Structures are given as C-alpha cells and as structure tokens.
Image: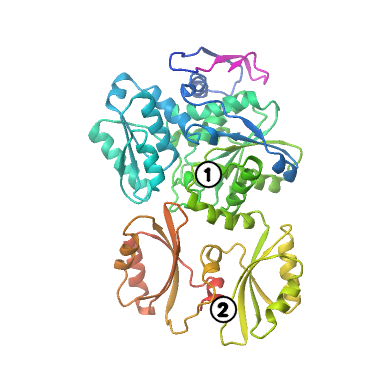
Amino acid sequence: MEIGRCAFGNFEAFRFAAPRNSNDEGDSSVRCARKDVDWVDIDYLQRILTSRVYDVVHETPVQHAPRLSQRLGNAVYFKREDLQPIFSFKLRGAYNRMAQLTPAERERGVITASAGNHAQGVAFSGEKLGIRTVIVMPQTTPTIKVQACRARGAEIVLYGDSYSDAEAHAYDLQRALGLTFVHPYDDPLVIAGQGTIGLELSQQVRSERYHVFVPIGGGGLIAGIAVFLKSICPDLRIIGVEPDDSDAMVRSVRRGERVTLAQVGIFVDGVAVRRVGEHTFGLTRKYVDDFIQVSTDDVCAAIKDVFQDTRAIQEPAGALAVAGMKRYVHKHRLQGETLVALTCGANLNFDRLRHIAERAEIGEHREALLAVTIPEQLGAFKAFCRVVGQNNITEFNYRYAPRDDAVVFVGIQLEHADQRLALIAQLEAAGYAVLDLTHNELAIVHLRHMVGGRAPEAKHERLYSFEFPERTGALLQFLETMDETWNISLFHYRNHGSAHGRVLAGIQIPSQDLQRFEASLDRLGYHATDESDNPAYKRFLT
C-alpha cells in the first residue's frame, strides 16, 4: 500500500510503505501540520505505519451492501474483517505485539487470557513466529474455541467461570513462569495493530466525509482506528457501538473516568468487558465523536442483514457495528450519507443460530409477541383469527384450562414497526385484553416455550432467572446451595451455544425464609434476577 501526498489537508506530508513481510520493516515519516496532535498521538501514528501485521493478514475489502443501502437510504459498506485467517480482526493486534517482542521475550514465551478471538490470534501468531504460547480460558469456553487454539500449538489452561477468573490466574502464571502477557486490548502495540484498519479505510473510502461504526469491548479496535482516521481526516465521524447491557466505555466517557460494571450481558460475548483499558479510554475519549447502544434483538436483526447482503454469518460482536449503524440512522434520520460498519468476527457456534433466528424478526420490528385473553369456548380461536385478518400468525401457544377465559401467547408478523401498536389497538377494539410482550426478555427466552402449565398448588412460589456457567457440575452446584425444604416448582433451560446458559426457576420459599434464600444466592455467585412481578409470569404461569 503506497500513499503519496495526503489529500486530507491535515499533514503537509504523509508517505509510508506498510511492511508486507518480516524482512521489510518499511519506511515511514510523518510531518504533522496539526496543532492539536500531541507527541503521544504521533507515536501511535508511527506505530500504526510501521506495524508488522501484513506478515500474516491481508487488506480486507470494503464491500457495498445494496439491500441495506436501499432500506436505509444511505450508501452502506461493510469492512470485512471477518475474512481474516482467524475470521476476526484480533489477529492484527496480537501479531503486531508478538512480532515486536525482544529476543529474550521470544525465548521465554507469552501468555494471555481469552475465551474468544484474541486467543486464536495469539495462538496463530505463536505458531507463525515459533513462540511458546500459553492461553488461560474460562472452563465455560466452548470446545470449538479450545480445539482451535490447541490445533495451533497453544498450551491451554482452563480456569474459572469467567474472563475475570481466567485473567487473574493468567497473571499469576505469568509471574511464576516469567512469560510476557499479551493484553487483548490495552497495549499500544495491540492498539496500533488494530489501527491498521483505519489506515486501509483512509484509502478505500474516497468520500471526504463519512461515518465509521466500530464495536467497542475493551476499546482497542476503536482506539486504533480513531487515532489514525481522526488525525488525518477530522471531518469524518467515528461512532462507537456497545450493547445496552455491556456499555462500560460510554459510561466511562460520560463520567470522565473509567468505571467498572457490576455485571455485563452475555449475548454479545465478544465485547462483554466490565472495565475498559486505560490507554483505550484516553484515545476513545479524545477522538470518538459519538456512541450508540443496541439491544440483543437489534444485533440478531443485524446478523440477518449482513447475511442477506453477503451470505456471511457474523458472530454477535461481528454484527454489533451494523446494529449500531441502523439505530443511529433511525435516531438521527440520516439520508444520503456514506456509512461504513465493521463486520469484525465470524466465529459463531452453530448452536446459537436457532436463538438468533428466533430474535431477528423482533429486532427488525417484523414480529409482535402478544398475550391475548380470549373466551374459553368453541370458535374463539377462529373469531380471534378473523380480527387478526391478513396478518400472518407466526406462533400460537395455548393449553386448555377449566376457566371462563384463556390467555394465548401469539406471534404476529408485521410489515413495519408502526403496525404493532395499530394491531394492539385493533384487538382491544374487538374486546380482547392484550399484553405486549415483544420486548419482554422473560417471555422471549423462556415463556414462549412453556405456555400451558399452571400450578395453583405451588404455594409461596417465587420466580428467578439465572445465568449459569455452561460447564459440568453447574446445575449440581446450584441445587446443593438450595435448602432441601425449598421445592423447585418450575424449571426451564435451553442451550444457546454460549459460555453461559439462561435458566428460569420457580422456587417455593416461605416469607420467613426469604432472607436466608438471598444469602444462599450470594454464596452461589450466579447472576440472578427476581422475576416474580413480571407480567408475563403472572399472566401465563400463576
């Protein structure tokens, strides 16, 4: 990649040759005309320009997305980082860090903690460079990821139920074994490796003003891209995208200091970081223009959008930027703009596709989930369908009970988002009581698979949703924590192919035992939410 005189007007001269192999160190010089770029930023630019990533990665294409462009009324492009050798951008940062180890560090080897794409990047780099690689992974890590790293010669240590457990153990091993820790995001060389994506975008996207949407986990990706692109072209806009249940960066930027989240969401596991990096926070705070947060359903819909335009299936974190782009367009009513979203990872467990497909239509506002009360009498279902009219029923769950009325769980296909409220009004006008469950997480994950069971004998029942680590013995550990006098009256679990399972449990707990029960939950350590007042539970299961 050769760049001549910079057309962006921020540097008097900008010339470099990005190294393509380990024997070509390249030549780089930067003469900065901007007054607001300090020497730390110049150092980052120099690191990006002399990055060693092109020993192993290739320049990924910026691919036009015609279907999504037409729907959104903007020119939409995907930066296809899912096409890298490990199907993720993470190879850039890991390799750049490891390629610049000293001879003594290479001799001793490296260690990292990761359950995902960074682990595969480190394993790939270790195999390529002939460096001993130790990777500490949570015991909940799916087998496919463990095997992928072992196949590249990495030494795998399984420890704990979470990334935090694995990271703490990795630092203990690092000190004991004298290894070099390769951080997944908070390292200047890792940030510089990811920043080469910005370098490529500066030549691939010829518009002088455009929006770049970047997913945020620990912040290494967006920090590297932002420091490069904003330093040479301040008119473009960098938008950071986070899940609404894993938003450590936006909270930190708003507060002016790094915050630590008590809990992070588990669906978009590739960015589930409780605390962002020190280096990444500083760069993001300085260079990123705006942030947008998205829901699980938004991400599922974005996975479908990318598939429709590319026939490639992204992991949730890989489609996060696309989800953010869609929501940002809607929020700010953008039209006629050039938008670039990073599709940055395709390491998806096949088992998760079922769950994603179920939620994609909700995320696209193409399905309404409703609890509708109908008379318990002959012909009631036919009468209900007549009111629904030509709208396609996607799901209908019902079980007879000897009562005057029945509550049915129904999914109805929508042509557009505004149709949901009109449909509810139409049903209510026909005399039906309607409860909108479209965004009720309990209903989406559990209740739609459980409709039909009621247990009036289950006195003192309380409902809790749990996040279980997906490992052998997790359920037994839960049961052994419970007092034998507390009867489990309801239980639902489905494997979604992620590191944590989601469980719904009804437990009969007398009022005088509530304090003792809550203490047992604290000892258990699983994330738990009291769902006893959830309207979906009250309507269908009590």
Which span is picked out in magenta?
A: 1-19
Say which residue appears at 57% left-offset and 87% top-offset.
Answer: 402
Quarter of the image with the N terminus in it: top right
Is the residue 231 above or below the residue 425 in the image?
Answer: above
Q: Secondary structure at mark 2?
A: loop
Q: Give residue 399's mark.
A: 2
Is the residue 435 above or below the residue 291 in the image?
Answer: below
Whether residue 32 is in magenta: the answer is no
Say which residue appears at 71% left-offset and 76% top-offset.
Answer: 384
Classify residue 341 by image quadrant. Answer: top right
In this rendered view, identify the residue nearer to me: 530 or 43.
530
Please state the horizontal and vertical placement of residue 261, each as a whole percent of the image.
Answer: 45, 50
Please state the horizontal and vertical placement of residue 95, each as a whole percent of the image.
Answer: 43, 27
In this rendered view, identify the residue nearer to me: 157 or 230.
157
Amino acid at dot 2: Arg
Say which residue appears at 59% left-offset and 87% top-offset.
Answer: 403
Query: Looking at the image, is mark 1 or mark 2 earlier in the sequence?
Result: 1
Q: Which residue lies under the disc numbered 1?
A: 317
Q: CA distance from mark 1 to mark 2?
A: 38 Å
Image position of 443 (left or right of 234): left
